[in-house]
Every structure is written in C-alpha cells, then in structure tokens.
Image: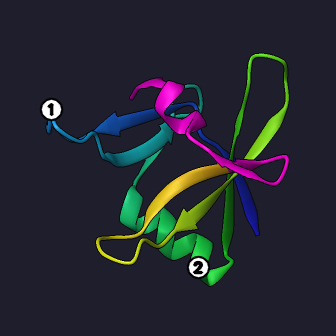
Amino acid sequence: MADYQITCITLSGSKSHDRITQVGNASVPWSLSTAEAVKRIDAKTDTFYVMDAYGRRANVGVVRPAQGLPYLRTFADSVWTDNLLSLGSC
C-alpha cells in the first residue's frame, strides 16, 4: 500500500460551493482526480494524508453524504476537518 502526502488541490469553478476536483503534491509531482483518490481509498490500495504547520499528520478519508457524490476530507484526533481546503492550488 502506497502512502501519499497531499500538498495541493484544484477546486471547481463554482463560486457558490467549492468542490475539490483534484489532489496532488507539487514537490514530487503527482496529481489525481478526486474520484480516483476515492476509488484507491475504498480499494485500500493507497492512503493519503496532509501535514499541518506543526508537523502533525491528518489522514484523508471518504465522506459519503446522503445525497451527492463522495468527497475527500481529513480526519485527525477523531474529528473530520477541512484541512484540504487550506492547501494551495496545484
């Protein structure tokens, strides 16, 4: 199982509701669509994470709302958070 650090995101063009469409790492570099990252997490073939300014890791998981598409969100200290939205653009 590969473990990937996410350092950047690409958002949809929607002003009313930003949606992450791609995740990646500008240093390595690599990028994946959100749908592909969800697929890899579900298949347990890859894991993804972000690091905060203090060097703490937050794992990335899949959230499945009652309506709508699954999306990525970070999970740290037993809490779902929006750390991905604080990352820079890919």
Circle 2 residue: 42
Question: In this picture, is 26 found above or below 2?
Answer: above
| Coordinates of residue 13 in the picture (x, y in percent) | 14, 36
The answer to which of 8 and 53 lies nearer the viewer is 53
Q: Nearer the viewer, mark 1 or mark 2?
A: 1
Q: What residue do we see at 39% from left, 78% from top?
A: 66
Mark-to-mark CA distance, 1 and 2: 29 Å
Question: In this picture, is 32 found above or below 40?
Answer: above
Residue 81 located left or right of residue 67: right
| Coordinates of residue 32 in the picture (x, y in percent) | 42, 53
Q: Name the mark on residue 15.
A: 1
Residue 48 located left or right of residue 84: right
> In this picture, which residue range is highlighted in magenta?
75-90
The answer to which of 42 and 18 lies nearer the viewer is 18
**Neighbour class for label 1 at 10 Å: few (<14), some, many (≥20)?**
few
Q: What residue do we see at 37% from left, 47% from top?
A: 22
Taking the view exactly as shown, the residue that stands out farthest to the front is 66
Count the marks: how many? Answer: 2
| N-terminal-most mark, 1 or 2 | 1
Could you say whether the residue bearing mark 2 is in a helix, strand or loop?
helix
Q: Amino acid at mark 2?
A: Asp
Inspect the magenta stretch and tell me whether residue 82 lies in it: yes
Residue 59 located left or right of residue 54: left
| Coordinates of residue 72 in the picture (x, y in percent) | 50, 56
Question: In this picture, is 5 found above or below 69?
Answer: above
* Quadrant placement of the C terminus: top left
Inspect the magenta stretch and tell me whether residue 76 lies in it: yes
Q: What residue do we see at 47% from left, 73% from top?
A: 64
| Coordinates of residue 43 in the picture (x, y in percent) | 61, 83
Q: Which quadrant would residue 71 be assigned to in this image?
A: bottom left
* Quadrant placement of the N terminus: bottom right
